[in-house]
Amino acid sequence: MQTVERTALFIDGANLYATAKALGFDIDYKRLLKEFQQRGYLVRAFYYTALIEDQEYSSIRPLIDWLDYNGYRVVTKPTKEFVDSTGRRKVKGNMDIELAIDALELAPHINHMVLFSGDGDFRSLVEAMQRRGVRVSVVSTISSQPPMVADELRRQADEFIDILHLAAKIGRDPAERAERPPRNYERRPATQHSPAPVDDSGDDL
């Protein structure tokens, strides 16, 4: 008798947003969750993003609220503001450590980790999960120019899934995009879609 695969999703929010944007489609998080629930036993679905706390309203808050109530474990932390060497003000919010700790703690309870990120910094985490007997799939794309996934991460993964091949299953209906409400929609009840998260690529430091 075949054992049902126990899977956990780890979504690097800013990275996934940038990847989908580069390919010209929006993620439908309800469909994404359903897709992976159908593939096996989904133990947990994590979503990581940084938030700008001093803003009166964060454009990503509706998405965060929706995810929180609809099957995702949302992990956030405040961004840090700094001035770079050229004197430009930048906002920094890196969630790599939080994602890595959660993955390693969950490793004894899953067979399969699905990482939605192309960030090469995760290569060591993927290797560590594999040493613990966990199969790792990386979801990103090589279909954009330039590719959104680091070569070293793609090589380390047990399986690389180009998100372009998932677009029909987890993408938002283009017709729905055409019917977007006006800009003041931000004050309306939360939906599952939202503008871009803060950049947490880690390239600025």
Image (tube, helix red, strand yellow):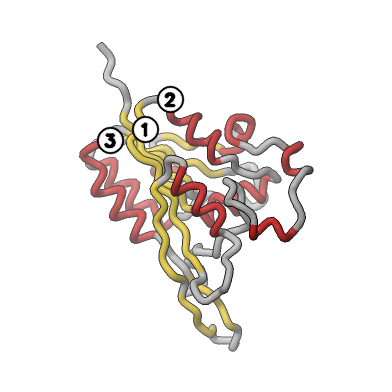
Res 27 label: none
Q: Are marks 2 and 1 in contact (CB under 8 Å)?
A: yes
Q: Nearer the viewer, residue 36 or 182?
A: 182
Q: Secondary structure at mark 1?
A: strand
Q: Amino acid at mark 2?
A: Arg
> In the image, what residue occupies the spot 35% across and 28% down?
41
Rounded to the nearest angstrom, the CA distance separating label 3 from label 2 is: 14 Å
Please give left or right for residue 60 compared with residue 123 in the image: right
Q: CA distance from mark 2 to mark 1?
A: 8 Å
Q: Classify 186 as above or below 36.
A: below
Q: Reading the chain from its start, which is encountered first: label 3 or label 2?
A: 2
Q: Give the class, few, some or many, for how many residues have Cα within 10 Å of label 2's Cα (few <14, many ≥20).
A: few
Query: Does 89 appear above or below 48?
Result: below
> Is 69 in front, or is 128?
69
Residue 91, given in percent of the width and then of the height, sits at 53, 74
Q: Quadrant of residue 142?
A: top right
Could you tell me residue 83's position as x and y percent? Answer: 53, 85
Q: Is residue 98 left or right of residue 16?
A: left
Q: Amino acid at mark 3?
A: Ile
User: Disc 1 versus disc 3: distance between alpha carbons?
Assistant: 9 Å
Q: Label 3, on which residue?
A: 110
Q: Is label 1 or label 3 in front? A: 1
- In the picture, the disc for residue 42 is 1
Q: At 39% across and 36% down in the image, what residue appears?
A: 158
Instruction: Give the residue at mark 2.
Output: 39
Give whichever of discs 1 and 3 has the lower sequence position: 1
Q: Secondary structure at mark 2?
A: loop
In the displayed image of the protein, which residue is found farthest to the bottom? 87
In the displayed structure, would residue 94 be above or below residue 177?
Answer: below
Quarter of the rendering occupied by the N terminus = top left
